[in-house]
Image (spheres, grey):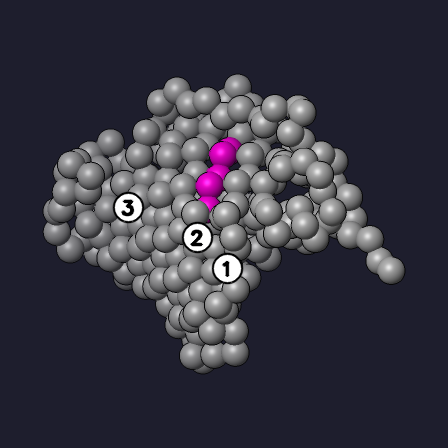
Amino acid sequence: MAASEVLTQAAQKTAEVTSYTVDAVVDVQHPQEGAGKVQGRMVYQSKPQLAADLTLDTVDMGGRGVPGGVRAVLQGDTVYVKVQALNEMLGATKPWIKVPLAETGDAGEARRYLDQIQQFDLGNMTKLVTASQDVKAVGTESVNGEDTTHYSGTFPVDVAVQQLPADEQAQARQGLAELQNVKFDIWVASDGLPRKLALSGSKEGATLDATLLFKGFNEPVSIEAPPADQVGELQQPTTN
């Protein structure tokens, strides 16, 4: 198959995946805000209900780190967030905060961690690269012990973002820092599913480099909500 057909098929196949694990590292550089890094792992399932368990060991933006990292568990229409700094800001007494998805628009910090889940999403990331007009096979390589074919190319951000669901396009543009063109490398195994994806781009002094490793396709996963006695309701920060 032509390289572009491989990517189209990969996007179709990822839509059928019901569970997976992704390890990701994202490095950004901004002329005003400085360097930033996000590193972590997400376990995802779409059945019997949508659920994700995100652990961010490193969250550092412009030299401002998040002590203790971040945990976010998505269960159906609710996200549970565990962030020490967020708890202190909201005056929470329990380690976890429960945020109904319908309210995340009013909960800026909680929404930010939910957006991280979208940036680690296998389906969305694979859809982005299908916008490429210049992808080509560049060789075969082993990824985590599996044989893969390595493809490389670029995609225009404005066209690529249009491949995503309408309600996720704005966040994707923001996540890609409105870069004009993004270079990508994707490693696809014989089953047509990606095992690794690397993205890099720059614009006016801002740069983004991301590497995602995928595994555990359609394997059983256990994503549990935190114990009820450790969960508090979302409280808006008090003002004096």
Does residue 213 sit above or below 208 in this rendering?
above
Q: Is residue 18 magenta?
A: no
Tell me whether the residue at label 1 lies in contact with that at label 3, contact meaning CB atoms closer than 8 angstroms. Answer: no
Amino acid on which the number 1 mark rests in the picture? Gly
Amino acid on which the number 3 mark rests in the picture? Lys
Q: Which mark is residue 65?
A: 1
Dominant secondary-structure state across the stretch colored magenta: strand
Is 217 on the left-hand or right-hand side of 94? Answer: left
Q: Residue at x 84, y 58 (%)?
A: 239
Disc 3: CA contacts within 10 A as few (<14), some (14-19) or many (>=20): many
The quadrant in which the N terminus is found is top left
Q: Position of residue 161 (x, y in %)?
A: 50, 56
Does residue 174 sit above or below 93 in this rendering?
below
Does residue 30 sit above or below 193 in this rendering?
below
Q: Residue at x 53, y 19 (%)?
A: 48
- Helix or strand or loop: what does disc 2 sit on? strand
- Helix or strand or loop: what does disc 3 sit on? strand
Name the residue carrying label 2: 58
Name the residue carrying label 3: 196
Does residue 144 sit above or below 150 in this rendering?
above
Tell me whether the residue at label 2 lies in contact with that at label 1, contact meaning CB atoms closer than 8 angstroms. Answer: yes
* Label 3 to label 2: alpha-carbon separation: 20 Å
Disc 2: CA contacts within 10 A as few (<14), some (14-19) or many (>=20): some
Disc 1: CA contacts within 10 A as few (<14), some (14-19) or many (>=20): some
Tell me whether the residue at label 3 lies in contact with that at label 2, contact meaning CB atoms closer than 8 angstroms. Answer: no
In this orientation, does residue 96 appear? yes
Residue situated furthest right in the rendering: 240
Amino acid on which the number 2 mark rests in the picture? Thr
Q: Position of residue 41 (x, y in %)?
A: 40, 41
